[in-house]
Structure formats: structure tokens, C-alpha cells
Amino acid sequence: MAIAANLNLIKSTLPEQVTLVAVSKTKPVSDLMEAYDAGQRIFGENKIQEMAEKWEEMPKDIQWHMIGHVQTNKVKFMAPFVSLVHGVDSLKLLSEINKQALKNDRSIDCLLQMHIAEEDTKFGLDKQELHELLESNDFKELRNIRIVGLMGMATFTDDQNQISREFKELNAIYESLKNDKVMSNSIQTLSMGMSGDYKLAIDCGSNMVRIGSSIFGGR
Ligand SMILES: *Cc1c(COP(=O)(O)O)cnc(C)c1O
């Protein structure tokens, strides 16, 4: 029951325009089902194989989000069912997602992951790489993917000012894409904020939060 209670508590604090991704990585299907029975339909996983196994076992009205770093050679395992890929940070990966989407006769929504944190361990594009990607001819030929927004992770720190600065920076890039003539039609999602910083992220413009431990407990 703790999972349902945690979920309802978090949902009661989220503004209407904010989508909750319940991050269920490493958790057993029984835990996910508890969240499902409490009404949750969007789950986030960071390993493709684990997500595919859970997809097979669980009800088919769930939307599965891939939130982790994606290895090109594993894209085929999620292409039949994934509803949003958060961590796309290269044209090579985007091309593979496009290819596998085509094989499955569908289109796959993606977020481009931006590097906003101070640490260099986190994946993501910088502003210049983002523009190079979006302006490349190879990108313009991809018909079976759709870029619907951006995703980012702030530095792991207690410094709220720094986290807020990084989130605002990402929000500014997001707003500039929304005002871009070519991109504006599809851009609608800004994925930022996790258990520790989602309130701050929402204050800085996030409309999709990825929350794991505050719902399912520690990992
Ligand atoms: C694990 C993970 C989360 C959730 O983290 P919590 O701190 O447990 O809420 C969010 N985003 C990404 C990319 C993750 O890997």
C-alpha cells in the first residue's frame, strides 16, 4: 500500500500540466502493478532488456519510457512498443531508432538529452551540438522519429542555486526550440526533475518529471 500512498501524495502536489513518469527500474513487477492499480500508466526504465521483460508481463495500456542511456545495438528490442525515448544524444542513435521504427511500421517519439550538469560523467548534447544535429541533412531525412522535446539532469549537489541555474538554462533552450519555425510544431515536452529536485524543476518550467525512489522506495 505504501506505493499507492506515495504515488497519490506526489500526484496531489503536481500541477495539472506536469506528467509523472514513475521510474520503476530494478523494481519487481508486483511493485509496478501496485502503482498500476493506483492508476499510474507511464513507467520509466533505464535498461532496455528489463523494460522489454516488464512490457511482456504487464497490461498493454502502459506507456513505457526509456529514460537511460541507449545502446544502439539494443534499440531493436524496444522499437515495437516504446512510447518515448528520453536519452537521445547523437544522430547515430537517432538514425538507428528511425530504422527500427520503420521496420515496425511506426514512428517513435524522442527527447534530445542536453548536458546541463557540471559533471562530465553525464551524457548529453551541448547547445552547439544540438543545433548541428537539428540542421543536418541526415536528420531532416528521418521520417520515423519525432523530436518532441528535451531532457536533462542537473548536477548532483546540495546547492539549490546551481540546480536552479541549470534547469533554467535547459528551459531557455526548450523555449528557443518552441519558437523555432521548423521545430515548434512537435516540441511539447521538457523532461527534468527527479525525486530530489522535481519541485525546483517544475518551478523552472518542467512539464515531465521522472520520479523513482519517492514512489517505490530506495534501490
Ligand atoms: C533513476 C532515474 C530517475 C529517478 O531517480 P529517483 O531519484 O529515484 O527519483 C530519473 N531519471 C533518470 C534518468 C534516472 O536514471
Image: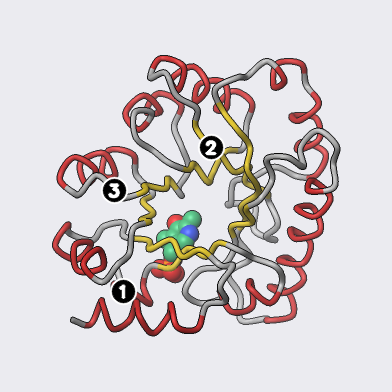
Residue at figure coordinates x 81%, y 35% from the top left: 131
Q: Amino acid at mark 1?
A: Gly
The answer for how far apart the CA atoms under marks 2 and 3 are is 17 Å
Relative depth, front residue between 124 and 105: 105
Mark toward the viewer: 1 or 3: 3
Q: Secondary structure at mark 1?
A: loop
172 over 106 or under it: above or below: below
Residue 4: give x, y in percent of width and height. 26, 77
Residue 218 got which mark?
1
Residue with the mark numbered 2: 109
181 over 211 or under it: above or below: above
Mark toward the viewer: 2 or 1: 2
Q: Amino acid at mark 2?
A: Asp
> Which quadrant of the structure image shows residue 170?
bottom right
Residue at figure coordinates x 33%, y 58% from the top left: 41
Q: Earlier in the sequence, mark 2 or mark 1?
A: 2
> Which quadrant of the structure image shows residue 7?
bottom left
Residue 209 got which mark?
none
Residue at figure coordinates x 64%, y 26% from the top left: 91
- Say whether marks 2 and 3 touch (CB < 8 Å): no
Q: Earlier in the sequence, mark 2 or mark 3?
A: 3
Residue with the mark numbered 3: 61
Disc 1 residue lies near ligand 1 with CB under 8 A: no
Q: Amino acid at mark 3?
A: Asp
